[in-house]
Image (spheres, helix red, strand yellow):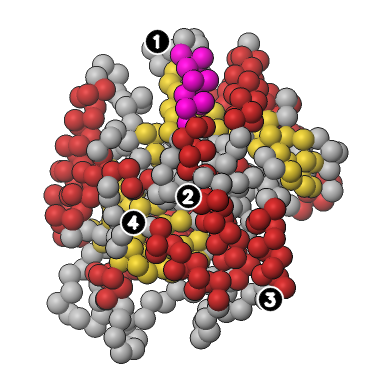
Amino acid sequence: LRQIDNEHLWHPFTQMRGHRAENVPLIESGDGFYLIDVEGRRYLDGVSSLWCNVHGHRVPELDQAVRDQLDRIAHSTLLGLGSVPSIELAGELVKRAPEGLTKVFYSDSGSTAVEIALKMAFQYHNQKPNPDAQSRDLFACMQHAYHGDTIGSVSVGGISIFHEIFGKLLFHSVQMPCPAAYHRPEGMSEADYHAHCYAELERLLAENHTRLAAFVIEPLVQGAAGMQMHPPGYLKRVRELTTRYGIPLIADEVAVGLGRTGTMFACEQEGVTPDFLCLAKGITGGYLPLAVTMTTDEIAAAFEGEHTDYNAFYHGHTYTGNALACAAALATLELFDSQNTLENVKANEQILAERLAELKDHPHVGEVRHKGTMVGIELVANRETREAFPADRRMGHQVTLAAREQGVIIRPLGDVVILMPAPGMPAAQIHELCDVVFAAIDKAIS
Ligand code: PMP
């Protein structure tokens, strides 16, 4: 297996054979919150298999729901047909989402869920063949954001290497400064930095609003940016301004949705209803690929009425609304109710807060960022000056390897150590995760 993996399997976000020297574990099975490799080694899954497995692996209720669906049918198309689980799931999502999000469009990854929202918002504003329609071809987004890896989602992302490589293929965006204060300019207070970010937000929207087709944001926490937390009230302010200027707001809850931050959807915490809500990852409990773009009656109205070539929405993947994935998603939502998953997130949030406080005076922990079951531990060479470690020490990566040696899987984002334990994880495993990761930090740095 390892030979074939090394020779033929191109892993994401690496050069071919990029992982070769590191003998990555080859996972064969799962057991609750653990992964088991072909040699029988058990690893605590500290990142819910890239933020997906909300209730762990081999969850009896989910296994059964997928088996039951398999006994009926695995897949049928949504082009020209309906399917029972996709309809049932749409109904459940509308019941649970912030009020006003009444339309459900399926796809199969977080990137496409965002891409669909961008395309819908664009078409909403640029309705052909109406010659009077205002042309809007610019998107507002956040500095450092990650919304996926398709051309559209990269266009509204803030990862500079992606823009450097694919820049010529991307469409236009305007980036708001990320209001997370840790990386503020030298000599500026946190309060001044926040004030600057709010002022820039206002200025950039006021200057560009006639061209803006949508504003896309990860509510509360920019996960892939290294768990950058927005100050309380920021999302609400974004909603006020986008409403004022008639700019649809796209909430990318691919990472922060499905209980991660302590509420089913992160937007709820600021009483915000976006015009688009994007979900993926945890929606099937990590069982099958499925994504959802929800939107409002108002947006959908631009696509209603008698069919013309211009009011259809031209998007639809082959596996859209796959029956097995929808069955897994329905069962996942039921587990949120039957297992009180949101209560468990709150309990985990408390345990994590207490355990992470142990890092308070650590000389190489610059900042610990934490919400719900999302944690970012930023490692620095000097806590006082916030000076980073030299890049070639790959400190985040070294911590990840040290944790793996001790049987725990985590992920680095540069020198930020990312923990994303499952919302349904029991207390004992949260402690195990903290014990191993804290020791791995010391081991890697020493
Ligand atoms: N948006 C956010 C906020 C994400 O974290 C991710 C994945 N890390 C995506 C979009 C893209 O999702 P996918 O990898 O399923 O395309």
Query: Separation of disc 4 and disc 3 at Cα?
Result: 32 Å
Q: How far apart are the alpha carbons under marks 1 and 4?
A: 42 Å
Percent coordinates x, y for residue 293 in the rendering: 42, 63
Q: For disc 2, does the CB lie below 8 Å from ligand 1?
A: no
Q: Position of residue 208 (x, y in %)?
A: 18, 53
**Foreground: 20 or 37?**
37
Tag 3 secondary structure: helix
Q: Which residue is mark 1?
A: 384
Question: Which residue in the structure is indicated by mark 3?
Answer: 72
Say whether residue 183 is visible. yes
Compare marks 1 and 2 and give the one earlier in the sequence. 2
Identify the disc placed on residue 188.
none
Residue on which the image places disc 4: 98
Kind of residue indicated by mark 4: Pro
User: For the magenta stretch, what is the residue range?
Assistant: 349-360
Confirm whether the magenta stretch covers residue 68.
no
Q: Which residue is depicted at the point 53% across and 20% down?
A: 355
Amino acid on which disc 2 is placed: Leu
Q: From what the image shows, is residue 17 above or below residue 335?
A: above
Name the secondary structure under disc 2: loop
- Kindly identify the amino acid type of the residue bearing the numbered disc 1: Glu
Spatial CA span between label 4 and label 2: 13 Å
